[in-house]
Amino acid sequence: MDQLEDIRARIAKSARIAARKPEAVELVAISKTHAAEAIRPLLDAGQRVFGENRVQEAEAKWPALREDYPDVQLHLVGQLQSNKAEDALALFDCIHSLDRASLVAALGKAMEKTGRKVPCFIQVNIGAEDQKGGCAIAEVPELLALARDAGIPVVGLMCVPPFGIEAAPFFALLARIAADNGLEQLSMGMSEDFETAVMLGATHVRVGSALFGARPKN
């Protein structure tokens, strides 16, 4: 698949510029709103890590796809309601949107109940935008401590920079916050800015439209 090869090549080039190994960057193909028929070509081309925004949507299409591609890794990249914590653990292999104490409590209880420890990223509201999810920068240490006390394996930080503004300073800031808190992984960078994110340390880039084309309208 040409788009997939192109994205992988651009990730590799950006990594080499930053003196990083290309394999240190995980491409998360954002398949939200796309039907199974649109996802299969990427699966056939070897892509195995996908991201979804909603538990319900993922439940509707991924169990059948996983029967044919059992080695798929599914990441939740959208906001998670606390009452969906157990459902999310049953379906997803990674959660990128841990952002508040109530969700820490819900996930901690669900992980203890199910025995399934799913790695999580703390989502940071890196641009301090009222309309976006994510915890405030100043709250990261406290939320991280709460998550660790609850037995949640926090592996890194995630952010979505403000739209229409140069993303590099926000990516650099997220990297510094992660380093200050002893976290090694960074979920940052999307279709329009993933190359910059890779050069600034991203370990996971979340690419949707550059792979799938324009998102279907509801």
Image: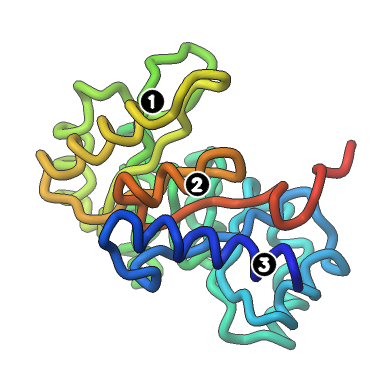
Closer to the observer: label 1 or label 3?
A: 3
Q: What amino acid type is highlighted by mark number 3?
A: Leu
Q: At which x and y percent is residue 197? A: 41, 44
Mark 2 or mark 1: name the one nearer the start of the chain: 1
- Quadrant of the image for the C terminus? top right
Mark 3 or mark 2: name the one nearer the start of the chain: 3
Q: What amino acid type is highlighted by mark number 2?
A: Phe
Residue situated in front as seen by the camera: 22 or 125? 22
Residue visible at 82% across and 43% down?
Answer: 214
Q: Do the residues labelled 3 and 2 touch (CB within 8 Å)?
A: no
Residues packed near mark 1 inside 10 Å, few (<14), some (14 to 19) or many (20 plus): many
Give the left or right position of residue 178, taking residue 182 as reference: right
What residue is pinned by disc 3? 4
Res 159 quadrant in image: top left
Q: What amino acid type is highlighted by mark number 1?
A: Asn
Residue visible at 38% across and 37% down?
Answer: 123
Alpha carbon of mark 2 to alpha carbon of mark 1: how far? 18 Å
What residue is pinned by disc 1? 125
Q: At which x and y percent is residue 35? A: 84, 60
Residues packed near mark 3 inside 10 Å, few (<14), some (14 to 19) or many (20 plus): some
Residue situated in front as seen by the camera: 181 or 24? 24
What residue is pinned by disc 2? 194
Residue visible at 32% across and 69% down?
Answer: 21
Q: At which x and y percent is residue 207? A: 60, 51
Res 167 quadrant in image: top left
